[in-house]
Image (cartoon, rainbow, N blue to C red):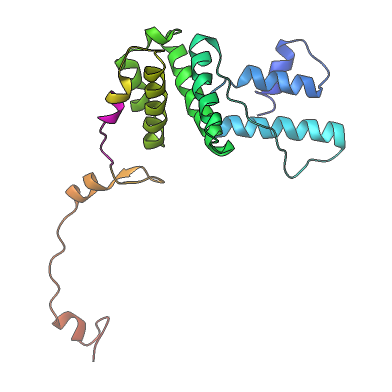
Amino acid sequence: MWKHGILSWMQEKNLTTYSADTGEEFIHSFIKPGYVTTRQRDVIRSVQALTDFMNLGYVRKKTFIPVVHPLDGEIGMQMKKLVHHLQSLCRSPITIKEYELYLNRFLTFLGYEQVYTVSGIKERHILKFVSTMENNKVDIVSYLRVLFRYWHEEKITDGNFHELLDRYKWTRREKMSYLRIDISSLLKCSLAVPPVPDSFYTQKGGIFYE
């Protein structure tokens, strides 16, 4: 991680001395706003450990850095109106943070789709975004429904996308997540177990006998 991570990055930038600002610049160049992967979290921890050792002489067990989910641009500005509305309704800080997280992810997705205005959001963008989310799909649909209902009520958009999300259906499939095995498909491949006669358990030398 060091050789192929921050060290090679510093060499490309012709930097010979590490500082806390260097670490922050590397993190921002490596990690874009939106969802942070497990590997990216490891990179952040490693850079923070390096900064701690340089500034403090030891590595802190816990480092608290507030996570910010920016809502920029025209669409982000309209999303902030919903956030301010929820704050006026005295929603909890945790709820507000969750809205900011999922709205930021949707905003990032729209950027990949080159959609930068509210009027440019189409039904296909919403359905594609929801379909690409593997986890917390129920929450995502719920937060987007609230967003588009608010936009519709405030005349920010003419689309009735909240009604689309009201009708949204998805199939929940049972899986063994750690092995990513589809239980339904596995059962179709299984063979029926033949019946075992009672004499098997009573025979001498068997597993159980009287």
Q: Is residue 35 visible?
A: no
* Residue at horizontal 56 percent and vertical 32 percent from the top: 97
The spot of residue 91 in percent (x, y) is: 53, 36
Apparent side of residue 25 relative to residue 32 in the rendered image (left or right):
right
The spot of residue 179 in percent (x, y) is: 38, 45
Q: How many marks?
A: 0
Q: Dividing the image into 4 quarters, which one contains the C terminus?
A: bottom left
Tell whether position 166 is magenta.
yes
The magenta stretch spans which residues?
164-172
Task: Tell me the chief SS of the magenta region.
Answer: loop
* Residue at horizontal 83 percent and vertical 19 percent from the top: 17
Q: Is residue 142 visible?
A: yes
Tell whether position 173 is magenta.
no
Dividing the picture into quadrants, the one containing residue 41 is: top right
Nearest the eye: 71 or 184: 71
Nearest the eye: 138 or 55: 138
Apparent side of residue 168 relative to residue 14 in the rendered image (left or right):
left
Apparent side of residue 55 relative to residue 85 in the rendered image (left or right):
right
* Residue at horizontal 75 percent and vertical 35 percent from the top: 49
